[in-house]
Image: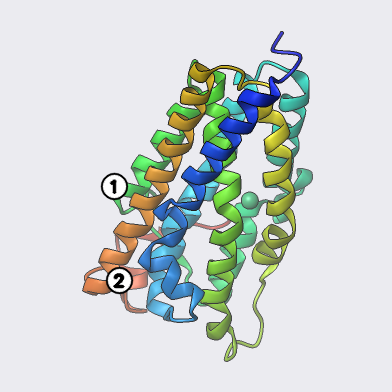
Amino acid sequence: MGRSQPRPASWSQARRALDAVVSSSHATQNPFLQRGHKGGWTFGDVRTFGPEYLHWITAFPGILAKGVSNARDDDTRAFLTEILFEELGRGRREYRHSNLFWRFLRDLGVTYFSTTPRLPETRALIRGMGDLYSHRRVATMLGAQYALEHQAVPMIASMFAGVRPLLRDITRTDIMYFELHTASEPLHARVMRRCIARYVGSPADTSSALRGARGVLNLITNFWDALNRHCTNATCLPSQEEDVAPRGRRLGRAG
Ligand SMILES: [Fe+2]
């Protein structure tokens, strides 16, 4: 089952290529996240991106489960399962990551959500990640997960910087979602290096891993760019009244 030993020379080249893809990606260098990083988000921005982001992270455990099933060695399965268990709150519903983010949104006054994503880019992100995580080439799945974890470090930092100025006037805000990910994402990114190294031992494997990395980063880029278009054009900024529009409903606890 699986490949017992990585091939260091090929892996070091593949690692450089993967890291170059991640570091040059617009997934973390897009205008929307950059504005957040500079503390320029408004409540309207959060009301716009928050529910879409919630749909994404609510779907993520199911997507990651496909990756667990797709892995071919027990060390990788164990690590992906560990992440999955964390996502699901280590068995405690209130600590599911989707519930942590839902509580954060609720504290900011965002309490109504559409039952399905409003943006086609959100639906494409969820569907596309599902396809990548069940890809017949395991290196493609792991390339996607590698890129996801590595882009998550700057993404969470930008999101936290973006919401911080908005919290000053709020008496109670649950920011566990951000604190938890700020602590865990760097470790996930490091361990993912060991996992994917087992599967990248040839140019073909490298190409597969890069395909997965580029695939997920493109989907994430499209997601943030779509949100930026809506917020910039002010066509999708719901007012408080629109937050309770008939097509939305109280979602209750996500996840
Ligand atoms: Fe998470």
Whole-percent x and y of residue 203? 51, 19
The answer to whether 184 is drawn above or below residue 195 in the figure is below
| Of pointers 1 and 2, the one earlier in the residue sequence | 1
- Horizontal side of 74 relative to 102 (left or right) equals right
Label 1: state its secondary structure.
helix
Q: Are marks 1 and 2 in contact (CB under 8 Å)?
A: no
Task: Give the Cα separation between the discs numbered 1 and 2.
Answer: 15 Å
Name the residue carrying label 1. Answer: 120
Q: Nearer the viewer, residue 183 or 116?
A: 183
- Side (left or right) of 253 relative to 29: right
- Residue 139 lies in what quarter of the image? top right
Picture coordinates of residue 161, whole percent (x, y): 56, 75
Residue 235 lies, in percent from the top left, at 21, 70
Cβ of mark 1 under 8 A from ligand 1: no
Which mark, by number, is residue 182? none
**Residue farthest to the top?**
1
x 68%, y 36%: residue = 193
Please tell me whether residue 80 is drawn above or below residue 204 in the rendered image. below
**Amino acid type, mark 2:** Cys
Q: Amino acid at mark 1?
A: Pro
Decide if residue 62 is in sight here.
no
Colouring chosen for the image of the structure: rainbow
Category of crowding for the residue at label 2, using alpha-carbon neighbours closer than 10 angstroms: few (below 14), some (14–19), many (at least 20):
many
- Total numbered labels: 2
Q: Quadrant of the N terminus?
A: top right
Q: Which residue lies at the image location 74% right of the left edge and 49% below the top edge?
A: 187
Residue 51 visible to the viewer: yes
Mark 2 = which residue?
231
Residue at the outermost front position? 9
> Is residue 17 rendered to the left or right of residue 116?
right
